[in-house]
Image: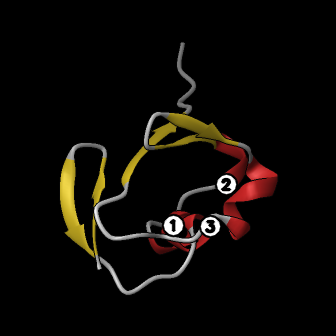
Amino acid sequence: MNVIINGEKRELQLETLKDVIEHFHLDENLVVTEVNGEIVDCEERANTLLQEGMRIEIVQFVGGG
């Protein structure tokens, strides 16, 4: 299935938004996710099924000083 993640088209064989986060080895507590312009809460990621052409934005918090 083809989805767009952070502006880049990718072909993935995953089922949910949570699967995408795990696929990229991200800490789900340190990212914000948006699907087709709508914020998706942490609790809803496992229930958010991927669909062809879905636009996903993943923003990871990074600390520094």
32 is higher (above) or lower (below) than 15: above
Q: Are marks 2 and 3 in contact (CB under 8 Å)?
A: yes
Q: Left of 33 or right of it: where is 10?
A: left
Of marks 1 and 3, the one in the foreground: 3
- Which dot marks residue 7? none
3 is higher (above) or lower (below) than 37: below
Residue 11 is situated, as x and y percent measured from the top left of the image, at 23, 76
**Image coloring type:** secondary structure
Q: From this viewpoint, which residue is outermost toward the left?
A: 9
Residue 25 is situated, as x and y percent measured from the top left of the image, at 51, 67
Which numbered disc, 2 or 3, marks the residue that appears first in the sequence?
Answer: 3
Which numbered disc, 1 or 3, marks the residue that appears first in the sequence?
Answer: 3
In front here: 27 or 63? 27
46 is higher (above) or lower (below) than 64: below
Mark 3 secondary-structure assignment: helix
Quadrant where the C terminus lies? top right
Residue that numbered label 2 is attached to: 28
Residue 7, quarter of picture: top left
Residue drawn at point x = 29 percent, y = 80 percent: 1
How far apart are labels 2 and 1 at the CA level? Answer: 9 Å
Disc 2 packing (10 Å; few <14; some 14–19; many ≥20): some
What kind of residue is marked 2?
Glu
What kind of residue is marked 3?
Lys
Mark 1 secondary-structure assignment: loop
Residue 23 is situated, as x and y percent measured from the top left of the image, at 47, 74
Residue that numbered label 1 is attached to: 25
Residue that numbered label 3 is attached to: 18
Q: From this viewpoint, which residue is outermost toward the right?
A: 43
Mark 2 secondary-structure assignment: helix
What kind of residue is marked 1?
His
